[in-house]
Image (cartoon, rainbow, N blue to C red):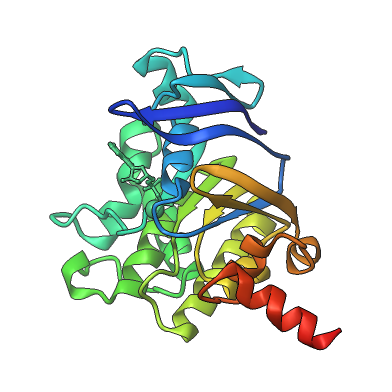
Amino acid sequence: MIKLTNINMEFNGKQILHDINLEVAKGETMVIIGPSGSGKSTILRLIIGLLKPTIGNIMIKEQEISCLSEDQLNKVRLDMGMVFQYSALFDSMTVGENVAFGLREHTAMSEKEISKIVSRNLRMVGLTDQQDRMPNELSGGMKKRVSLARAIAMKPEIMLYDEPTAGLDPIMSGTIDRLIMNTKRMLGVTSVVVTHHMSSAFTVADRIAMIHNGSIIEVGTVEEIKQSENPLVQQFIHGLKTPGAYVRRRSNLV
Ligand code: ADP
Ligand code: MG
């Protein structure tokens, strides 16, 4: 469904991504983990076509997108929903208008049909009867859920999530994790989730890719990542200060 081949990305002559290869199968949830500044959001922006790679190919559903025009890209994007790190709701629109936005812009649905979808999606994310509120009246977790309700309104085949649980308390993070899994189950979507919450990663992932300084250093199932011999992976998933800390701890155990 998504295939990145030999992606290199430079900003102002500085190389940010090094030879990234990553495939996400239809219906799979790929979680990208890694330290802040390692290039995770850049990968999402490449997938949605907001950035073009310096070198490399990006296939979305068998179509190479790095050479498409803005018009052609917009068509591809209709199949993708994105939940941004900072929700990115339209502040001047009500919750309901936010969720309805894509349907009004891109479909010929009647207002009655749209209103049905809006209520259904808001109910799905636990925000029944909230359509008349304004984004600035909502908590961070509620905004994220509106953003999710908006992203799935167009029934995308691909969902991209950038740090969907950042800044949320553990209970709300758990709610968002469940919504990500429900969305996968109900819509059969292919998902890429960027997070640095390990509990989230282990909960929602089919596979995890760990990125470090712009390179993918490990890809595997949750079990494979937990048992990785790579000290950088162990350092990251256990929140240790240095890679050596894990090696020392392990050797104490043997
Ligand atoms: P992450 O999401 O893992 O925290 P990002 O993908 O946002 O990391 O950024 C990776 C690196 O690329 C950072 O060093 C960041 O400063 C740089 N970067 C990201 N976007 C741009 C841009 N548009 N112009 C210049 N540098 C950028
Ligand atoms: Mg980021």
Where is residue 141? Give x, y as percent: 36, 74
Tell which of 252 and 212 is nearer to you: 252
Quadrant containing the C terminus in the rendered view: bottom right
Q: In the rendered image, is residue 234 in sight?
A: yes
Where is residue 205? Give x, y as percent: 67, 61
- Is 81 placed above or below 7 here? below
| Residue located at (54% from left, 55% from top) | 193
Determine whether, in the image, residue 55 is placed left or right of residue 139.
Answer: right
Q: Classify residue 127 by image quadrant.
A: bottom left
Tell which of 120 and 160 is nearer to you: 160
Q: In the rendered image, is residue 78 in sight?
A: no
| Residue located at (39% from left, 77% from top) | 168
- Is 103 placed above or below 242 here? above
- Is 135 placed above or below 218 here? below
Q: Classify residue 240 by image quadrant.
A: bottom right
| Residue located at (13% from left, 55% from top) | 92
Where is residue 137? Give x, y as percent: 18, 74
Determine whether, in the image, residue 83 is placed left or right of residue 221.
Answer: left
Residue extending farthest to the left is 92
Quadrant containing the N terminus in the rendered view: top right
Q: How many marks?
A: 0
| Residue located at (62% from left, 71% from top) | 244
Determine whether, in the image, residue 21 is placed left or right of residue 121.
Answer: right
Determine whether, in the image, residue 56 is placed left or right of residue 84.
Answer: right
Where is residue 203? Give x, y as percent: 66, 71
